[in-house]
Image (spheres, rainbow, N blue to C red):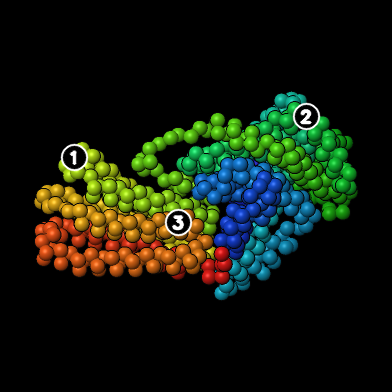
Amino acid sequence: MNYSILDFLGLLGAVGLFLYGMKVMSEGLQKAAGDRLRNILSAMTRNRFTGTLTGFFITALIQSSSASTVMVVSFVNAGLMTLAQSMAVIMGANVGTTFTAWVIALFGFKVDISAFALPLIGLSVPLLFAKKSRNKSIGEFLIGFAFLFMGLSMISRYVPDLQSNPEMFAFLQKYSSMGFGSVIIFLLVGVIVTMIIQSSAATFAITLIMCSKGWITFDLACAIILGSNIGTTVTPLLASMSGNVAAKRTAMGHLLFNVFGLIWCLAIFYPFCNLNVWLTEVIGQGNPTDLTAFVKHLEATDPDIYNHLFDGSLPQGHSALKSIMAMQVSVSFGLSVFHTVFNLINLSIMIWLTGVYVKIVEWLVPAKHKEDEEFQLRYISSGLLSASELNIAQAEKEIGVYSQRMERMITMAKDLVHTKEGSEDFNRLYSRLEKYEDISDRMEIEIAHYLNRCAEGRLSNEGKLHIAGLLRIVSEIESIADSCYGISKTLIRKQENKAPFNEEIYANIDMMFGYVHEAMSMMVKELTDIEGVDETELIHSYNKEREINNLRNQLRQGNVTNINDQHYDYQSGIFYMDIIADLEKIGDYIINVVDTLKADFRRPTAKR
């Protein structure tokens, strides 16, 4: 049988179906869990052991260590998790990825996949039309599960039969008999294949099928699995490229964890493989190395049966076919044992070295100190999005930083009021306010663009409402910057008209600034924990807004009296009231943010 380009495209399609199945499973689960998944991940990383368990369970559920580590990078980027906490979660994720290997080992060769995949899809489709979004998400999860095993079955069908292609067989034979050099070569094959398809689980499935059919020996299959642990670090590395320093350090820590594990494993590679062969025999699954020897012996002693073994022409009850099927199960268990034992030993060693990891990655990825006034989003970036539900947390943290910048802008506006007009300090502070206003516009656009990208993903209904609320908050915060800049432009007009302010005006403006700054500080505090705002904080914000409005009314009435009593001239009063009006507008924008927090984010049942 010649291996045509159509067969190769069929293999690509089978791998694609396998990966798509995992993607649909992951997204269906994330939608079904919604915010709960994010809250669980942030709550269960308080120490290295709970963090490790969290990484294990999350990866086992979404069937992808790449996806879970990208999520971890996102959380570190968002400031929800420290670098040390992320190391523990990543270690757990490496163990969690073995869950997929065990699912494949337990079901992939013992069950006729087509016998349950299509019925499972048939049972799941009605859930897609359910009224409850959670039921729809469960349906997607089940369909993704079926796709995963359909892809596995098709990979088995389309992987090239090296025995029937002498050229390819000769090529592999050349590199499969070089002793330890072959181990290094096939390890690199595992790295490259996993880098390309960005899934160690898919690499495991392909390796499992190749080894189970006797095309490569068990130890070389182990080398490919070992390499896949390095290749899977590419996805989080890509995700961190446009992230902050903490995100880059997290991805680097993931790479180092697997590299250090690779070093000790290569140092004892053959004894370690023998250990896993023994463990496979202990659990009653036979010797996984027997398959290759059996196939080679069959080729030498009975070439007719050997030639018909892989083309499906042998009857189901044939003794050779029965032996092959039993040995396939042994190989699948052997590789799963290798994958699991390697990651468990690696974890048991490395979990005690978390502090060392942190120091190493901090040295490898040093922090770059940049001026605060340079435009650079701290928590979100234009890089890869991990999961729309989880990316909302990054936007929330970035909005918190956005509000802190605007709080500083209010302070700058107050300082500008008291700075001597026409002086170098006045011009420098005015330029700084102007720059902050420009930064504010750009931050609004970037955060809104990021939220829109999140909205294009697969979101729960709660996630969609949160994004709508965050977009409203971003718009209100930008309006605060406009009002602060409006105060600076009023002062420029005041300077051009040479309108003086007396001590009474300055005192009243400072009083209004004080009220507004208190309201702003409350809002910033609330935005640091958007989903945990309680009733008391909201009541304080509403009370402060009423105080601002009452003071504005009081100062407006007093302004008329003061002009009539000739405390200052009419023109000075106009500029004075313009500043008061801008400050009162800031209060309105702040309370609009508070209203959004109350309507879209506060959990009424929460007790503090």
Q: Identity of the amino acid at label 2?
A: Ile
- At horizontal 21% and vertical 41% (from top left) the residue drawn is 427
66 sits left or right of 211 in the view? left
Q: Can you see residue 181? A: yes
Relative depth, front residue between 183 and 26: 26
Q: Which residue is mark 2?
A: 268
Q: Position of residue 13 (x, y in %)?
A: 60, 50
Judge left or right: residue 265 versus residue 513: right
Say the numbered circle drawn on residue 522: none
Residue located at (58% from left, 42% from top): 83
Q: Give me the C-alpha separation between circle 2 and circle 3.
A: 54 Å
Query: Circles 2 and 1: CB distance less than 8 Å?
Result: no
- Which residue is labeled 1 in the image? 423
Q: Amino acid at mark 1?
A: Ser
332 displayed left or right of 301 = left
Q: Amino acid at mark 3?
A: Lys
Most extreme residue toward the bottom, as rendered?
131
**Quarter residue 335 falls in:** top right
Which residue occupies 57% across, 34% down? 361
Q: Residue at x 23, y 64 (%)?
A: 555
The answer to which of marks 2 and 3 sits earlier in the sequence is 2
The residue beneath circle 3 is 525
**Residue 359: x, y in percent?**
59, 33
In this view, the residue in front, 573 or 222, is 573
Percent position of residue 211, x then y: 76, 41
Looking at marks 2 and 1 on the same chain, the residue that comes earlier in the sequence is marked by 2
Q: Nearer the viewer, residue 404 or 304?
A: 404
- Residue 8 in view in this figure: no
Give the SS element for disc 1.
loop
Badge 1 or badge 3: first in the primary sequence: 1
Which is more foreground, mark 2 or mark 3? Answer: 3
